[in-house]
Image (cartoon, rainbow, N blue to C red):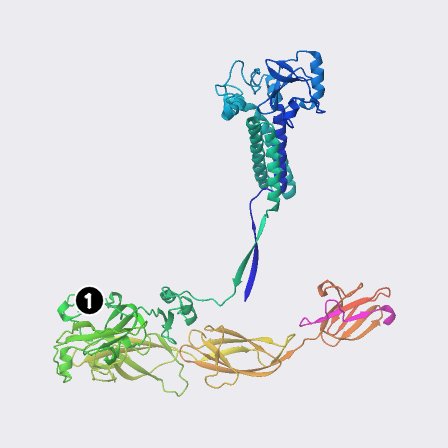
Amino acid sequence: MQEKIIKKNRRKRLAISEIILLITGIIAFSCLLGNSFPVVSAQNADLCTKDKNGNEVRVSTINNVNQWCLENGGSAVCDGGSNNWILRTHACPTEETTKVLSTAIPTLTVIPAARDVWGMLKGKGVLPTLPAAEGFVGPLTPPGWKSPLAGKGFFGRIVERLTFTGKAWEAAAGPLIVAGIVVVAIATYTFISVLIKTGDASRAAEAALRVGIGAGAGALAGYLIVAVVGGPAGWIIGGAAILGALFSSWLKREQDRQIDFMCKPWQAQTGGANCDSCNDNDFPCTEYQCRSLGTGCEIINKDTDEPRCVWKDPKDINPPKIQPWEDALTEGYEYVPLPPVEGTGVEIKYTGEECLPFFQPFTFGVKLDKDGYCKIDFKRTSDFSEMGFDFGGKNLYMKEHTQQMSFPGVVHLEQAGINLTNEGEYEFYVRCEAATNGKANRDEFIFKFCIDPGPDTTSPIIRGFNWLDGAPIAYFEEGETREVNVQVYVNEPSQCKWSHEDKSYENMENNLTCSDDLINFNAQLSYTCTGKLTGLENSKQNKFFFRCNDNFGNVNIQSKTLTLVGTQPLVISSVEPNETTIKAATDSIKVTFEAKTSAGYKQGEATCYYSDTGAPGSYVLFSNTNSYQHSTNIWFGPGNYEYFIRCIDLAGNSDNKQISFTIETDTFAPIIVRVFRDGPNLKIITDEEASCVYDNRDCLYDFDDGIKMTSDDKTHFTEWDPDKNFYIKCQDEFGNQPAPQSCSIIAKPFEV
């Protein structure tokens, strides 16, 4: 699927209104300065010698300079170089000349601006009085001062026109004051207009600052350029600003950009650097989780309790690196590295001893740099495939592997008729195969140790029983044989006995059956003796004592005890539902099975199950159980049902119950089968038990807001009023009622 998205990209430009304000400020300020400054723009050079009708006019001469006289008593000099009229403070020589010239050039009347602002401030004593001087452009020029560059070439004219005074701050004061007025005026207008339009004070302040600075900069630029270049510069700047505004109006504040968006299936990142992180979670890694971590990730040990996520890196060509795993080694044992001449591996030693104690299980292990499957063998082989045993009894790919062992001593082997050639010294060889590439170690990793040669002077160790000490046993019925089977686990081949009392081995009455075979041990590396415990009593603690004697005459001088607790029969004291009908207003009804248990073990503490057939293997565990109260929820449709309930306690006591029930569904609102007037009352009869309400306006009311009628089973009544209609709604015990806009019946006086 492809989707095209058009984005509008906003650019930060002045708005048209801001541009217009800026242009207006520049033009106005330039014109003001052009007329206020002693430089007045003329339309062309002919104005210096012609009147407004184009006729030749005689000019008076003062100091050999052509000048026109003004009405205000000043004069205007025609500058032949720039064709501009330059204001003077001289009076005209004759009254006649003044009248003629004032009629010829009425457009030269001075407009108050920068100079007048300066003059206003001078009159109030804010700024010093600086009289103008003849022969200079600026009204601020001090008398008698003249720049040495004034009038000399192009740059000389620039200096002459910018040289108002010998002090820079006094020369700049006039234009800066007017520029400040323009900035404040335009910025204030912009702030108010933007604030009214957007309501955002920060945005309005930003716009006012931007526009005000632009307008002030434009005003200063206009002032300076007019002063340097001459009068027409103000109009040139204004025209350029207008053209800039027209060009800017063509520029978009929004730009359309097309982005192609492709909706494709998600892909995991390449490689598999993060595969191993899946193995560090609280729950086993799943194949989906593993493959989501990288294209090179793959799950191993599928369908086991120890799945692993590994990186099948095609560049990985090395087998796992094997190291002895310190944390796996049984406490009191240690690894000692083998000399290089003996190969790669370690020797396992018992703390403070050279060899390991016989018939004492110990655990050791290997740790790999990558997930691998490890094998172990007591003889050397040519490769991994020829090795005979799985390390730790597991064929899983893991980074950590453990192995448990226990060995008889030399004396035990010799007694069993086994001739030793190794004098109690053992070597086991380990290789591992990598899950990522199938590469296995070529060289074995060696675990070396020796077993204490003897003699055996220690008594046997009874490690445990098939019963937990203090375990409950099932209740014995009348006539039932009161005995249980028992298994005793010993660390070495021995003969064992038991008694109801603590006695010496020789005086114990009951023998157990034990095996003398050195290689006949269980998964816990223990030797098993079996028998039966008799004389058990219900509801009592039954205590038994055990002692053993090994093949070298070492006898336990202390008994090992086992206590079994007698119990009572378990009883299901109640169960629900049973022999009842369940009704509801839905097609699927939730039914809660509830059971209570008593007696048995721990006052009825048990686990309960249910089944619809009672067949073995068909029972389902209650959702809330392992107590004396049990419950579970099941959903049923209409029909008749039979179920079987079974509860079992920890001692094995059990009880069974059978229940039956019927499910009925009611999804219809009550029906009014009769309505009539009964004396002073309006009475209605419904087809089922219900509660009824009414309203005298219409059916558009909630049931809870209606006026309640007096109900008795299926009969309902209220006070009769011949001037009102009765809009009646009825609801049954399941909540079935008419639709919100409907009534069960509308009772009108003329119909009842």
Quarter of the rendering containing residue 324: bottom left
Residue 470 horizontal/vertical position (percent): 34, 74
Seen at 41% across and 64% down, the residue is 269
Whether residue 195 is visible here, answered yes or no, is: yes
Quarter of the rendering containing residue 348: bottom left
Return the residue nearer the eye: 544 or 268: 268
The kind of residue tagged 1 is: Tyr
Question: Where 363 falls versus 519 (above or below)?
Answer: above
Q: Is residue 268 left or right of residue 165?
A: left
Question: Does 493 appear in magenta?
Answer: no
Seen at 86% across and 71% down, the residue is 751
Question: Where 250 falls versus 494 (above or below)?
Answer: above
Question: Where 266 falls versus 387 (above or below)?
Answer: above
In the image, which residues are magenta?
A: 729-752
Quarter of the rendering containing residue 94: top right
- Quadrant of the image containing the C terminus: bottom right
Question: Where 696 falls versus 531 (above or below)?
Answer: above
Residue 331 horizontal/vertical position (percent): 23, 66
Mark 1 neighbour class, 10 Å CA radius: few under 14, some 14 to 19, many 20 or more: some
Q: Which element is circle 1 on?
A: strand
